[in-house]
Image: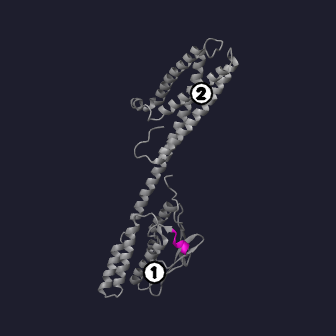
Amino acid sequence: MRAIQPGEDRSSERLYREVDKILVRASVVTGLFMGLISLLFYEVIDARPEPEVALFSFGMAFAFTMLIWMFNIYINNHRGLPIVYQLLPAEYEFRGRVVICLLLSEGLLRVWTGVDLFYQMESTGTSNIAGVLQVRGLLIVAFSLITTWGVEKALAQQQAMGMISRLKEENFQAKYEVLKQQINPHFLFNSLNILKGMIRTGNDDAEEYLIKLAEVYRYILQSNAKEDVVLADELLMLESYHFMLKNRFRDAIDLTVELSPETRRSVLPPLTFQMLMENCVKHNVLTQNRQLHVTVTEADGAVLFRNNLQPKQSLMSASHIGLQNLTRRYEHLCGSPLKIEQDDQFFTVLLPIIPPGHERPYSGR
């Protein structure tokens, strides 16, 4: 274990506290166990087994074990003895802990032995009470060192896995930000060119077109920093964008939306509908005789964005970069990609319905 450095999250701090609690519980259990062992040991071989002698053996073994454990917890945390850790190379840290712990245990054992001999509480019949205590003390020290060292290694591994997870999340987030910047790079310039042509020809819808353009572009600016938006807001943007397309293609495109109120409250990546509508216009023929019909409906837990298929010959082998982009954004947002269905008549994109307040698949997990 180590001290929490500035900038580390609170989850790490909670983790350290939980580990400390586990080690303290282990120290209590070990202390009770060693106290019982000591009690049984002296009850069997002591020359004069008496209740106060048994209680003394139990109490001294328990106290010794607890002190060794507490010291191990302290020095295994870099908040303890920071000067020692600054002087010792990383590869010698564990050896340093062993030496420090042995020195402490030796001091405690001398106190234990001194108290025992002074009050003549225990007698093994071998006149070697110091040797017996040394053996028992070394067993306690070895157990506590191995346990705390094992917990530290397990914690370090868990921290490494957490760091890898965070790096993956940060990398994924960075890629997502790049993807968002790729949306509609020429949208504003194309729209302004269309508006200029409408004004030149005296089109009566030029003012309304400008209003819709402002609404769409305001929506783009407001939603660009968001990871998800409410579907109802996305539909308002889609209607404004549809108005602009109708003026551009002379009513060669129509839009029908049939979604339940519950679905309208769901969320999706920003500018999803704008990208799908733009994709329809880019890849299909639009004329007065061959109108493009776009529908937004729902079925089986998905929003269906569908258009009749009348592909442009020059784009038969298009790469569909926009759809690949949108798929990755859905995977980032909900862990599920969108689906595409195509037959001789229709091209359909199935968008997973994401409830509000959902949890992202990479939450720093």
The alpha-carbon separation of the residues under discs 1 and 2 comes to: 86 Å
- The residue positioned 63% from the left and 25% from the top of the image is 58
Q: Nearer the viewer, mark 1 or mark 2?
A: 2
- The residue positioned 47% from the left and 52% from the top of the image is 168
Q: Is residue 148 visible?
A: yes
Residue closest to the eye, 127 or 212: 127
Up the image or down, 6 lies above or below 267; here it is above
- The residue positioned 42% from the left and 81% from the top of the image is 243
Residue 60: percent from left, percent from top:
59, 24
Residue closest to the eye, 7 or 313: 7
Residue 270: percent from left, percent from top:
44, 68
Q: Secondary structure at mark 1?
A: loop
Mark 1 or mark 2, which has the lower sequence index? 2
Tally of numbered discs:
2
Identify residue type, mark 2. Phe
Up the image or down, 139 lies above or below 344; here it is above
Residue closest to the eye, 167 or 63: 63
Which of the 4 quarters of the picture holds residue 314? Answer: bottom left
Find out whether residue 263 is within the magenta segment.
Answer: yes
Marker disc for residue 62 = 2
Part of the protein shown in magenta: 261-266
Position of 146 with respect to 243 (left or right) is: right
Residue 238: percent from left, percent from top:
45, 76
Identify the residue at the far right of this view: 44
Residue at which label 1 appears: 285
